[in-house]
Amino acid sequence: MLAVHPHGQHRLASIPARVGIGLKPEHRKAIIHSTPDVGWFEVHAENYMGAGGPPHRFLEWVRERYPLSIHGVGLSIGGAGALDKGHLKRLRALIDRYEPVLFSEHLAWSTHEGAYFNDLLPLPYTAETLAHVTAHVDEAQTALGRQILIENPSTYVAFEANGMVETEFLSELTLRTGCGLLLDVNNVYVCAVNHGFDAATYIDAFPAKHVREIHLAGHFEAEPNEHGGLLIDAHDSPVRDAVWALYEHALRRTGPLPTLIEWDNDIPDFETLRSQAHRAEELLLERRLDHALVH
C-alpha cells in the first residue's frame, strides 16, 4: 500500500518483514552513495526534536527511499509523575513530519520530579503499576493519534513486590490499551542470565500475536563477582550466538516480522552492521519459507 507524500512522492505505508538498521550519522556517506538493500531504518526520536539542520536533511533523504520506524527513549511511560506534555507535543510533531510506520517506547521510567536519568529503569509488576502504565499508554496513544509498541526491558534488579510475571503484565497491557509490543530478544537473554530464568520459556509465554517488531543487539558481560555474572544491554558489539538461537526460537512463535539490528555504541563501519543484518535476513527468509509451506 502506498501513501502520497505532501511533496508528491510516494512513501511506503508499511514495513516489510525484513531486517532494518538503526540510522547513524557515521554511515551517512555509505548510505547515500550506495542506497543499500536494507528493509527499513529506525531512529531515536529524541535525536530529531530540533527544527532542522543536517540530521533532518539526512533523515528526509532516507525517508523518501525507505520505510521508517521511530523509537522513543524519553517518554518515561512508567514514571510516577504525569507524562511530559511538551515531550508528547514534540513527538507528535516528529511523527506528523516523517509518518513512520511504527513508533515504540519502553516499559520503563526515566524521570522523577523534573529530573531526567540517562537510563531506563525497571518497574514492579503489580496491579497498581499496571493501572498507572495503562493510563500513560492510553494518554500517549491519544496524543500521538496512533498505536504505540511497548518494548520489554533489560533489567538488573527485580522487585520482591512483583505480583505477576513480565509476560502477564505485557499481555494485560495490550488487552487494556490496544497497544502493540516490541520483542527485544537481546533484552530477554540479558534478563534471563541476570535473574536466573529460562529465556526460551519466557519467549513461549510472550503474547506473540501482539508483536509488531523485533530487536536484536549485542551485550556486555561484566566481570563476575560473588553473586555471579551480569550482562549489560550495551548495544556495542555483534549479536551473540545465544541471542541468534533465541531469535530463531522467537520467529517460530511470531512468524516473520520486521527485525532491527541495534548498534548504538562503538559504532562499526557500515559493512559490519550490514553483515549482521544479512545474517538476520537469512533467518527471516528461512522462517518465511517454512511459513509458506505450512500455509
Image (spheres, rainbow, N blue to C red):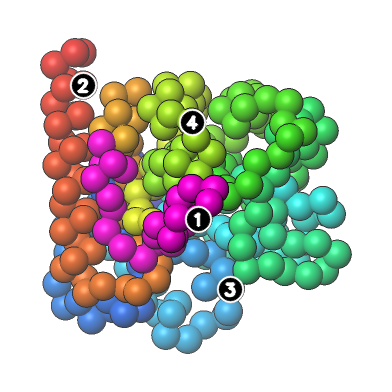
Are circles 4 and 3 on residues that touch, CB within 8 Å? no
Which contiguous range is marked in magenta? 220-245
First reached walking from the N terminus: tag 4 or tag 1: 4
**Which mark is in front, 2 or 3?**
2
> In the image, which disc is placed on residue 291?
2
First reached walking from the N terminus: tag 4 or tag 2: 4
Q: Position of residue 245 (x, y in %)?
A: 25, 36
* Residue at x 45% of width, y 41% of height: 193
> In the image, which disc is placed on residue 197?
4
Q: Position of residue 145 (x, y in %)?
A: 64, 46
Q: Please say whether residue 230 is one of the residues in the magenta stretch.
A: yes
* Residue at x 52% of width, y 73% of height: 47
- The crowding category of the residue bearing disc 4, from other C-alpha atoms within 10 Å (few below 14, some 14 to 19, many at least 20), is few
Amino acid at dot 1: Asn
Q: Please say whether residue 268 is one of the residues in the magenta stretch.
A: no
Cα–Cα gap, marks 4 and 1: 19 Å
Residue denoted by label 1 = 225
Residue denoted by label 3 = 49
